[in-house]
Image (cartoon, helix red, strand yellow):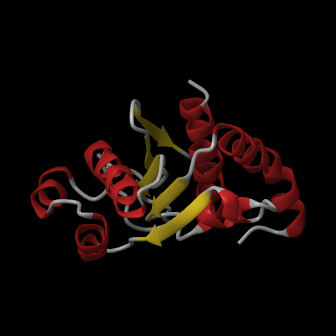
Amino acid sequence: MCGEEDARAAAPIAKRLGGVLTQRGLTIAVAESCTGGFICHRITNVPGASNYFLMGIVAYSNDAKEEQLGVQRVLLEKSGAVSRDVALAMARGIRDRARSDVGVGVTGIAGPEGGTPEKPVGLVFIAAVTGTHERVERNIFAGDRVAIKQQTADAALTLVLDVVQK
C-alpha cells in the first residue's frame, strides 16, 4: 500500500467525507475491483469510521461481480468489466446488499498489463449512487500500479464527497 507519509497526505479527503457522512447520518458501502480494497482502507483509517462505513467487497473477477454484487453476466459480456455500466451496477449492487445510503463502484485497469488501445492501462470508472443521485466518472490515470490505485482512491472519495453534499 502507500507509505505512512502518503497516508497522512491522503487523509484529509477521507476525514472530510467521514465528517459529512456523520453530520448527515449517512452510511456508505464500497465495491472495488482495480483498487483491491484501498478505498475501504482509506475510509477505515479515519477514527469513527464504524459509525458510517458498513462494508466493502473486493470483486476482482467477473464471477465475483456477478455473484457478490448482482452485476448481470450479459452486462459484463456486452460492456466489459471495465466500463461505465459495470461501475454503476457495482455501486447499485453494494448499496442494495449493504442497505447503505451511498454505494460506490470502482473498476479499471491498474496495469502494467491488461490495457488495450480501446481500454488503456489507467482507465478507471468510478460510480457513486444514493437514493436520489447516480454519477459515473471516466478517468485515465498515469503512473505505475500503485500510483493508479492512489489516484483512483482520491478520485472516488472526492466524487462521493461531491455527491453526498448535494
Q: Pinpoint residue 81: horizontal percent, then vertical percent.
A: 28, 59
- Check the image and report above or below for 136 versus 115: above
User: Is residue 29 depicted above or below 158 in this figure?
Assistant: below
Total marks in image: 0
The correct choice, above or below, for 93 with respect to 63 in the image is above
> Is residue 53 shown to the viewer in this render?
yes
Q: Quadrant of the N terminus?
A: bottom right
Left or right: 101, with 18 as reference point: left
- Tell me which residue sits at (79%, 51%) in the image: 10
Where is residue 76, by image quadrant?
A: bottom left
Q: Residue furthest front?
A: 25
x, y percent for residue 50: 68, 65
The residue nearer to you, when weighing 135 against 115, is: 135
Is residue 94 depicted above or below 154 in this figure? below
Residue at point 71%, 60% (across, down) = 49
Taking depth in this image into account, of 132 and 33 the one nearest to the observer is 132
What percent of the width, then of the height, locates residue 110? 50, 61
Looking at this view, is 27 or 4 the one in front?
27
Q: Foreground residue, 73 or 82?
A: 73
Image quadrant in which the C terminus is located: top right
